[in-house]
Amino acid sequence: MDLDELPDVTVVLLLLGHAAIAVLLLLDALAPPKLRTLTLRVAAGAGIVLSLGLAIAGRGSPEWRGFILDADRSLVAGTASACAWLLVGARARLLPRVERGALVGAGASGLALLAAGRWLVPSLLFALVVGAAAVVLLLEGRRRSYAWFGVAAGLAIATAAFTVWWLDAELWELPLAVEGWEKWLVVAAAGLLAGGLPLTGAWAQGAARGSEAAPLLVGAGFLLLLRPAAGEQPWVAASLVVLATAAYAWCAVKERKIGTVTACPILVALAVSFVAPSMVPAIAVASLLATTVLLLMPAARPTAPVLLFTHLPLTAGFGAVVVAGEVAFRRAVDAGEVIDAVPWSVVVVVLPAMVGASLLLARRLILRGAGGPIHSDARVATWLIAGASLALALFPEALLIGDGLPSREILLFGGASLLGLLTAVIVRRRAGSDVSVPLPDEPLASPPAGPRFARTVAAAAALFSLIAVAGAAYLLVEGLKLGFL
């Protein structure tokens, strides 16, 4: 059967199946802990299957009423949901709470509907569903106000941008692109949701409770980048590449915990989206895989995260970065003026250095995660992600990259990685035994002590929440007045 001829009931299952799993999980809330653990694992497996089905079905672009499974957006939403369910299954034995799995199910269906939606108001409402599920998941930690703030600010800024766009365009269909300052509002919202601001949003708690929300929020952020904020912006891309390289190098040298370094892959993702917009799906998948590995590391103590970090050879992100380097090189050569070639040249020169700095940071994370207990479920989940990342690197067409990767750029970036590896070996020998290893009771991804200004941040989060809900409500009322809804 062709993917574009899927029955309506199949499309409905791919979009709403996660919500059905959530309802079934709530029915099991009063069961004994062992039964709840088994139920969570079964639910996680079913959720992963549905997520992969959504990612694959998007290639045929099947439709159902006001929804269409676009290939790019379905790939991002499916990967995000699969990563969230994988975290649920990996932590089922450590945290057998079915209500958390139910929240992931609700958020995953909201994300799928957001990815497939064609109309403005329903899409904003689905985004609010994803944000609400994520906030509830994040409310237990000590930095819950910072978590709430990051999510609420991202949703409020996105809602404000789309409301202003509608006042000018008066169109109810989601825009393929927006221009002007509204576009940069959408980019800022995408960065906040995806984790571009450290220690806020999904990463406010580090890898503590609530981290199942991180893939859902990262996926929502990249959906905003795919449409309507993508486009070539060489100066912005060059600035972000330089900033990401500096952040990688700083975090690799300094003794920082994972909660403060998660913005690095997101910075690279934003940079790549402005170098080669067609690479956004690939870099989104790579960033989601890297995010999930960072979340699993405290429990898995993995031996091979060096293969999983976003921009290293034989990983999904490596392919996207290589193609972005090729695009930047061609733009630099074809530029008519010297000033036009400068930002593209900066990207070409700095990207290999970024790859080497990324490897240094991966080594730091390995050393930081050398101690502590090992949980088999988390380790199995880590190796599943490793296999997926390797498979996507070996078959880049699965990431919509195209016919393959350019060989010259592979040699260039591979050489940069080898240089980074050599630097890591030299640094390790000089460091000797001075590299600290966390004790079993010292979480690898714990955020700094605090929090500070919790009440002020909570008040700001409440204000942003009101803005997001008010904007969506305003558009909903306008739609009802005009008879569109």
Image (cartoon, rainbow, N blue to C red):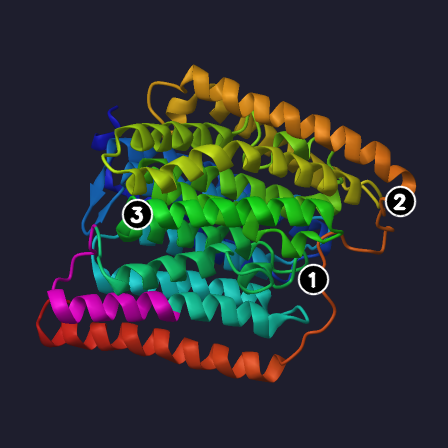
Give percent across and percent down for residue 19. Answer: 42, 54
Farthest top residue in view: 407
* Residue 175 falls inside the magenta stretch: yes
Question: On the rendered structure, is 349 left or right of 376?
Answer: left
> Going from the N terminus, do you reach mark 3 or mark 2 first?
3
479 up-or-down from 74: above or below: below
The residue that label 2 is drawn on is: 434
Give percent across and percent down for residue 84. Answer: 53, 48
Question: Which class describes the residues within 10 Å of circle 2: few (<14), some (14-19), or many (20+)?
Answer: few
Which of labels 1 and 2 is toward the front? 2
Q: Label 3 is placed on what type of residue?
A: Ala
Residue 230 image label: 3
Q: CA distance from mark 1 to mark 2?
A: 22 Å
Residue shown at 72% from the left, 59% from the top? 446
* Residue 107 falls inside the magenta stretch: no
In what quadrant of the picture does the C terminus appear? bottom left
Q: Secondary structure at mark 2?
A: helix
> Going from the N terminus, do you reach mark 1 or mark 2 first?
2
Question: On the rendered structure, is 77 left or right of 438?
Answer: left
Residue shown at 44% from the left, 49% from the top? 239
The residue segment tinted magenta is 156-176
54 up-or-down from 398: above or below: below
Residue shown at 64% from the left, 37% from the top? 381
Which of labels 3 and 2 is toward the front? 2
Question: Which class describes the residues within 10 Å of circle 3: few (<14), some (14-19), or many (20+)?
Answer: many
Q: Label 1 is placed on what type of residue?
A: Pro
Which of labels 3 and 1 is toward the front? 3
Quarter of the rendering containing residue 32: bottom right
Q: CA distance from mark 3 to mark 2?
A: 44 Å
Residue 447 image label: 1
